[in-house]
Amino acid sequence: MNNSENKYCYKYPHPAVTTDCVIFGFDGTKLNVLLVQRGGEPYLGWWAFPGGFVRMDESSEDGALRELREETQLTPEYVEQFHTYSDPARDPRERVITIAYLALVKIQDVKGGDDAKEAQWFPINKMPHLAFDHDVILRDALARLRERIHFHPIGYDLLPEKFTLKELQSLYEAILGINFDRRNFAKKMFHLDILTQLEETVWPTPKREANLFKFNLDKYKELKQRGFRLEF
């Protein structure tokens, strides 16, 4: 090999790079996180976020999306990189730096595959022990989601196509961990002008009828691009 061929071959050790994706879903009352049960060492049988090593010919985002498809059969529309974790002791195998992503999906059945034995939703307040430093990653991901909810109309990525105002309010309450006055919450949502009331109703209880809504996708996208600040 001549000098022109090896001038970029450094003698320094190269750390491995992985991705981990924190996937949030909403079941109508609770905020949930999708975990996969590890099928190999280290942490065999422990719960962890979907993720894996980034290949030499792909970006970290492409690697994260590939791992999601392989381990959960999901392809989320909302995926955001939010932090990098580089503690030298975070992985017992070798020096591993992980790039963390946050994804929002509608609750659905998923199946494990490849190096994941099983995929399962867990309520945010009933999480099992997590592998590696994933408890720290989860804490940071939840903080990021709570920050984003004030600037980003995330309901479209978490709610079914048709929903009640109560379900929308429950989503915000589940994420922020606080309760809202029903009338004040509805007023703020209508002020955003992204909801369309449908000519359909449901009966959450035998004595109460509720209107169904859906998001106006054009206005929803416009609001995302324009930006806003939603205060509660």
Image: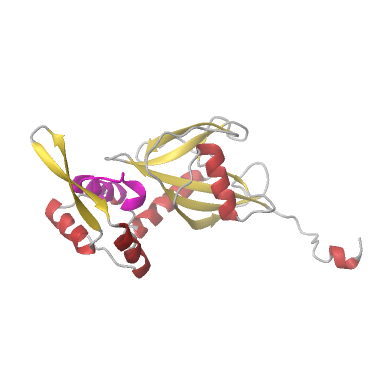
- The residue nearer to you, when weighing 129 against 31, is 31
Q: Position of residue 154 (x, y in %)?
A: 34, 54
Task: Specify the principal SS of the magenta part.
Answer: helix
| Residue at x-position 31% and y-position 60% | 220
Quarter holding the N terminus is bottom right
Tell whether position 161 is magenta. yes
Q: Quadrant of residue 222?
A: bottom left
- 71 to the left or right of 140: right
Q: Is residue 136 visible?
A: no
* Image height of 36 relative to 142, above or below: above
| Residue at x-position 28% and y-position 47% | 171
Residue that lies at the very extreme toward the right in this rendered image: 2
| Residue at x-position 34% and y-position 40% | 125
* Image height of 118 relative to 2, above or below: above
* Image height of 161 relative to 223, above or below: above
Q: Quadrant of residue 186?
A: bottom left
Q: Is residue 41 visible?
A: yes
Q: How is the image coloured?
A: secondary structure
- The residue nearer to you, when weighing 15 against 213, is 213
- The residue nearer to you, when weighing 35 against 199, is 199
- 31 to the left or right of 170: right
Q: Position of residue 105 (x, y in %)?
A: 40, 45
Q: Position of residue 188 (x, y in %)?
A: 19, 60
The magenta stretch spans which residues?
155-175
Q: Position of residue 178 (x, y in %)?
A: 24, 50
Residue that lies at the very extreme toward the front in this rendered image: 199
Quarter holding the C terminus is bottom left
Residue that lies at the very extreme toward the bottom in this rendered image: 226
